[in-house]
Image (tube, helix red, strand yellow):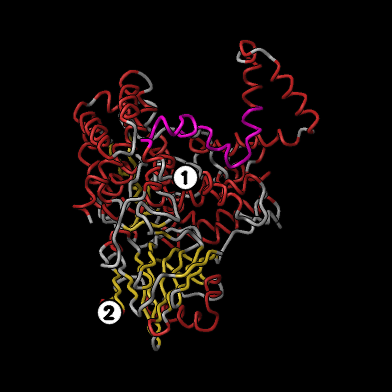
Amino acid sequence: METGRARELTTAMTADWRAPVQVSIGQHGDTLAVAGGGHAEAGTRSIVFQGRIHWVDGAVAGMTGAEIAKRLLECHARSGEDFLGRVKGSFVLAIMDPEAGYVLLALDRIGQHACYYTLSGEGIVFASGLRDLLRHPAVEPEISSQAVFDYVYYHHCPSPGTIYEDVFKLEGGQYLRFQRGTWSKEYYWKPDFSERLEQPEQAAQEELLSLLKDAVQRDAGDPSRTGSFLSGGLDSSTVSGLLSTVHPGSCNTFSIGFPVKGYDETEYARAAASHFATRHHEFILQPEHALNAVLEIAGYYDEPFGNSSALPALYCARLAVENGVDRMLAGDGGDELFAGNERYQRQLLFERYERVPSVGRTLLEGALSMLPAVVKNRGILHKANRYVEQAKVPLPDRLQDYNFLHRHRAETVFDAGFLEAVDPMEPIGLLRTAYGRPERADALNRMLYMDWKTTLHDNDLVKVNRMCELAGVEVVYPMLDDDVIDFSTTIPSAIKMKDGRLRGFYKDAVRSFLPAKIIDKSKHGFGLPFGIWLSDYSPLRELAYDSIEALKKRRFFRPEFLDHAVEMHRSVHAAYYGELIWILMMLELWIGGRNTNQ
């Protein structure tokens, strides 16, 4: 539990929620106006929430947002913060009592929504959008050097911090309690990785598919106005297929392709669309589309955001809107629930080294250390030495072996004065904290849980949420349904990766549902072909290189590092260094445009 005390407290508390929900309490206004989500009052207390809420101990189906809000307020009156353990769904909520100087903020288990806050001389200021929070007169935003460093490490600004000093965001399954200047922050929910599979494996596979169908059924709206992202991968194909069973003959699916070999998966999306007889729509992205949208994308995010797949997400969402769809189902989450990323498989190979008796490890490491470098760095001995070197690094640190800032010394990347203001160990510290949070879990489940924060809450959900919002379409995540999450924690790791296969259990569960072409396809490891587009399309290259040049004035980076990044893209490794160029370009475009976008 984290605790603290604000510097001062008045009775003013403000919640400037992103439209369509707007709340103002205290000296900044006395009216409450809510459209969407839900709002209720009881005496001096009030509640407002955004999102979709359903209950553990009783259905709320058919209730209006106001009725759900009233029930939440009643449960809080009886149980205090403990009531959050019985709430399911995707939501952000605030309970306020100005007379008692009390505020409770909470997010759903994974953090499908967002909540920003700062503790100021006026008490606490909070919002579901960072830009809304910045409009409050008590907030004086100043860019955090640490956050810029963390952005380069992660390619986004990780929670609980933000790009601004003294402004923070809640994490999934977390609440913040503020009362009369004192605050505390706790996790009201953490997964119990019991790995207790209390039924035959085949029955468990059938249950998973049933739970996913229930989640899709819950999220499916008007057939003519609901669609699904369809990349051709396992998750989006499963969600799209289940939506087609809910809306037979009228399921809309949407895909984005690229005219670059090795990056395009539309053949798999078409195979899934044909298999489920969906109304399929696709759009092929060209480099000029990136040029047209990159400034818009950079400016729409509340913080610098370097995930280049935001571009296809935006165009896919806009394609849906053009076809009359205003709610999209996304497949995010399956890899992180059921072990679908190659890094999980690779790390478990390294974990086996710990099971070698210590005497054997000592002898092997001693023998390798005595070999001349010219011998040790060749053939099978090189692989053995590299394996041992990596295996000796504990998780989660070992996961970052590929990270750019682990392969390049910070002092060769960043300005010396800038580095004085940052802690280079903070990013890995955040990973260690998340990895260690589950009270009982093996290495695989700890990696999965860590990715619920770093990959989903901080990255992928931010990407899709904001791009759908920019396009004007709602997005929901059936894979992240609470019942599906709870079920995933009961599946033993040995079954999740049965026979060493990525998502072995999940694939077996959907094998009779999805076409074999989808099940048996190799994992797609590419993203946006930005590096290649930079080489081939001069207007985009000029924008990117001009942004890198402008970034020199920020005094974050060593100028020679920025020049080196451009030169390496021009000469070799266009794809690898293209991603670095994108990350740096988006940082500069966000900073350069923030005064006009706030």
The amino acid type found where label 2 is placed reads Gln
247 with respect to 311 (left or right): right
Measured along the vertical axis of the image, is residue 468 above or below residue 511?
below
Measured along the vertical axis of the image, is residue 119 above or below residue 25?
above
The magenta stretch is 388-416
Examine the structure image and report whether residue 229 is included in the region drawn in magenta.
Answer: no
Measured along the vertical axis of the image, is residue 328 above or below residue 590?
below
Return the mark for residue 27.
Answer: 2
Measured along the vertical axis of the image, is residue 218 above or below residue 228?
below
Q: Which residue has dot 1 on it?
A: 423
Sequence-first disc among 1 and 2: 2
Quarter that holds the N terminus:
bottom right
In terms of secondary structure, where does tag 1 sit?
loop
Q: Quadrant of residue 345?
A: top right
Examine the structure image and report whether residue 412 is included in the region drawn in magenta.
Answer: yes
Return the mark for residue 384.
Answer: none
Which residue, as the protein is rendered here, is positioned at the far top? Answer: 374
